[in-house]
Image: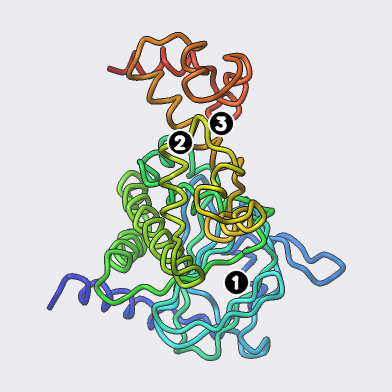
Amino acid sequence: MSEIQTVEQFIMSYAKNNVTGSKEFSQFTSSHYGYLAHKQDGTAVFGTQRIFQGDHLRIYLHPFNAPLYGLSPKHYHNYFEMGYLLRGRATSISDGVETELIAGDLFICNLQSLHQCKTFGTDDYLFNIMIMPSMFDDSFLQMIEGNHLFTSFFMNSIMNVNNENSCMVFHLQPESSLQFFLHKLMVEYLSHPEQKDPVYLRLLLACFFRELGRNYGDKMEQESQQEQKDLSISQVISYLTDHFSTATLQSTAEHFHYTTRFMTGYISRYTNQSFSDIMKELKLRKTCEYILNTDDTFEVIAEKVGYSSSGYLNSVFRKKFGMSMGEYRKYHRGKK
């Protein structure tokens, strides 16, 4: 028997022993989910006071309540939520858009999206995985993103409250890396309720998000190729990466023989980022490389990455990293 099968058996056993069908949803959410209040329009507000209690991560089996026909209140919150359907069926409703889920599906709601979940019986095992935004600090994001730009796009998508796509759905194939890391995370959390190892949980979560970002990139690549047979989003990103200091929307569109209007929509559709945001990301990544690996002055670095002045680059840099270029160089070189 493979390790993944053993892990899945543990999670299934946990779910069977923790069915919440007999509990009132309001009582359950009050003690577990951090339910705060109902607004006049019927929307529930969930907070972090009770739910996290000093931790960054919580995993619960989604409750089924027969009087409410399995539907949770319409709600929003200021933390991230993922839902993983281990068995059965469920429906995710995010900002009015319904998505039918099957076993193996994972949905991710971005911050402040208005959503509900519906299960259909006590044999539907939907796990809620909730994460405090403070988990996603700079060191954690660096572990996740590495040099994989689409992972950065993916993380920006779920953290952007203005993103039109407020819920993303992935299917975790059996015995895939995605399933492996998620199941290990769940077992580590659920099997050690009083002695959880926060460092190990953080590493497992980082591995899972890194795999998810790569999966997201592969998905966008396939969809972009289906739309345009002679173009893929990776070709566009590769061009921008090679010409990060000089590329403009006009030059990029002309290089691929498309209009600027088409290129604007194409990039936004498959990265959830604007052209200017991608260029800023590429320039800041290169800026970090120059700061750490050369003794170039900041004026020289600004010129290399395509900024007219080091002062303006420094203000953009500080907004992204919370420190100036000089502080960044001193901090990281001091760690060596």
Q: Are marks 1 and 2 in contact (CB under 8 Å)?
A: no
Give SS at disc 2. Answer: loop
From the viewer's perspective, is the residue at label 2 or at label 3 nearer?
2
Quarter of the image that includes the C terminus: top left
**Of marks 1 and 3, which one's residue comes earlier in the chain?**
1
Q: Position of residue 231 (x, y in %)?
A: 45, 61
Q: Could you tell whether 92 is left or right of 17 in the image?
A: right
Q: Residue at x 41, y 35 (%)?
A: 139
Q: Residue at x 33, y 60 (%)?
A: 185
Q: Quadrant of residue 215?
A: bottom left
Of 54 and 293, nearer the camera is: 293
* Three-letter amino acid code of the residue under disc 3: Lys
Q: Could you tell whether 75 is left or right of 154 in the image?
A: right
Above/below status of 61 relative to 129: below
Give the CA distance from mark 2 to mark 3: 22 Å
From the viewer's perspective, is the residue at label 1 or at label 3 nearer?
3
* Three-letter amino acid code of the residue under disc 1: Phe
Give the CA distance from mark 1 to mark 3: 39 Å
Above/below status of 212 relative to 27: above
Label 3, residues with CA under 10 Å away: few <14, some 14-19, many ≥20 = few
Quarter of the image that includes the N terminus: bottom left
Give the CA distance from mark 1 to mark 2: 54 Å
Q: Position of residue 288 (x, y in %)?
A: 42, 25
Give SS at disc 1. Answer: helix
Of 1 and 279, nearer the camera is: 279
Q: Could you tell whether 33 is left or right of 203 in the image?
A: right
Q: Which residue was labeled with disc 3?
A: 320
Q: Which residue was labeled with disc 2?
A: 243
**Of marks 2 and 3, which one's residue comes earlier in the chain?**
2
Q: Residue at x 55, y 25 (%)?
A: 317
Q: Which residue was labeled with disc 1?
A: 28
